[in-house]
Amino acid sequence: MTAALIWIFLPFTAAIGLWAWSRHPAQSTRLATLLCLFLATTAWLIPIGKVLRLGPLTLEIQPILLLAGRRLNLTDTDRPLLIFFFTIAAFWFAGAQQAGSHRLFIPYGLAIVSFLVAAMAVEPLLYSALMIEIAVLLSVPLLFPPGERSVGPGLLRYLIFQTLAMPFILLAGWALDGVQANPTDTNLIALASLFLSLGFAFWLAIFPFYTWVPLLAGETHPYAVGFLYLLLSTTSLLLGVEFINAYGWLRNAPQLYLFLRWMGAIMVITAGIWSAFQHNVGRLFGYALIIETGFSLLAISLNSRLGVEIFTMLFLPRVIGFGLWALSSSILLQAGRSMEFQQLERVAEKWPFASTGLIVACLSLAGLPLLAHFPVRLVLLEQVARQSPLLAVWVLGGNIGFLMSTFRLLAVVTGGYFGPRQPGERPLQITLLSIGALSLVIIGLLPRLFLPMFTGLLSAFTRLP
């Protein structure tokens, strides 16, 4: 038995079965959540490439599967990544029914997870572009279920930009092969750098290619777009780190880290400024996604061991913050409210838990003290300030712009009288919202207890600082 059969083909096969069973969303949700928890637990308990003895029985999971002349390679050092991906999927699937997601969310979401894991496993690395493109195409019915709503410009831009990334990554692979054969060829090095930059700029929605993010977040279901962007951006970031780890000339180029620093800063600054003028919670969510990617690029640009650790520690607050925001917004949508600020006036009177979850998630993503994002952001800004004090001030200014929009949203949703009133949320929704909000507070108060657990995510990348 190979690792790819367990963590790639099994969830994809299950996705096909759940698609046929999609008329029963409650059962599909439970099955998908349990399967993802099982796969995460299996990755945690069972080593890859080692013989495991269970009494008279022996079990060995082979790391490599040959398929159509390519290798799907999942080694023992990839187990933290597998745990992370399938735990995220279980986390989002568990709240899908309470968020009012459509019946196709579970099967297409599970299929997307399997292809993104394949993108991390496939060798040669350039074929990850094909896997991500398949995941992008599968995401269309996840975002816009057939017959439910018309396609907007955000989806079209999303498809165009994500598809444009594929040829650039493939061309970069061709140029990188030439660089390995002739390391002194500066023209090939320049071409490889250009193609890689453009490919990842499209994948990660780096400035100026991020216009689709707030558009898509404003025109589709928040739970679907939060799940999709979180997984896609995480996979693209990890693939970018894998490219840096694999190629020494790229890893040792000081221009790379300068480019990442400026791109990350520009994303935080511009998205923060634009978010200050938003009147739609969906588009505000989109700018929060952009800001998070910008901070990840800033962490990588530090080119130090601390920068790598900050990069991994950003994941936990991001997952919980995005999940709480998406669930809170989805519950308000179910209640007949739109995402426009004017339609959210005094919603805290009738939906106090959804409103609280929305505000706590916004404040955490804005880096407010005592919440989950603050400790990591503080250390990151301190390190950026040591290299470029003026740039750190501008980044802080962009973050303040997002915080201002959060205070505006807080004034809108709480602008009423809070008297005795029956909450509009269901008991299970209240439970999930409370757990999410309390998690952000507890992580913010005890960061040393939770955040270092994620530093093992990059154990497979042995050449990083």
Image: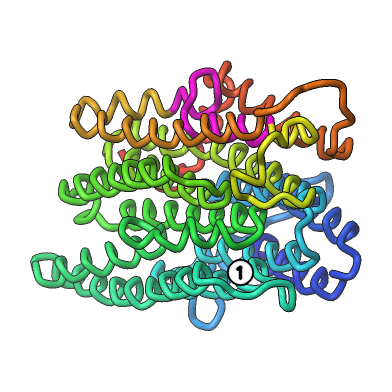
| Residue depicted at 64% across the width and 66% down the height | 143
Instruction: Check disc 1 and report its element: helix, strand or loop.
Output: helix
Q: Is residue 198 magenta?
A: no
Q: Residues within 10 Å of mark 1 (few under 14, many from 20)?
A: many
Residue, far bottom: 68
| Residue depicted at 34% across the width and 34% down the height | 307
The spot of residue 441 in percent (x, y) is 62, 22
Please state the extent of the stretch shown in magenta in the rendering.
356-376
Main SS of the magenta part reads: helix
- Is 401 left, or right, of 120 in this rendering? left
Q: Is residue 225 above or below residue 124?
A: above
Residue 348 appears in which quarter of the rendering? top right
| Residue depicted at 33% across the width and 46% down the height | 270
| Residue depicted at 41% across the width and 38% down the height | 311
Q: Is residue 372 magenta?
A: yes
Name the residue beneath numbered marker 1: 139
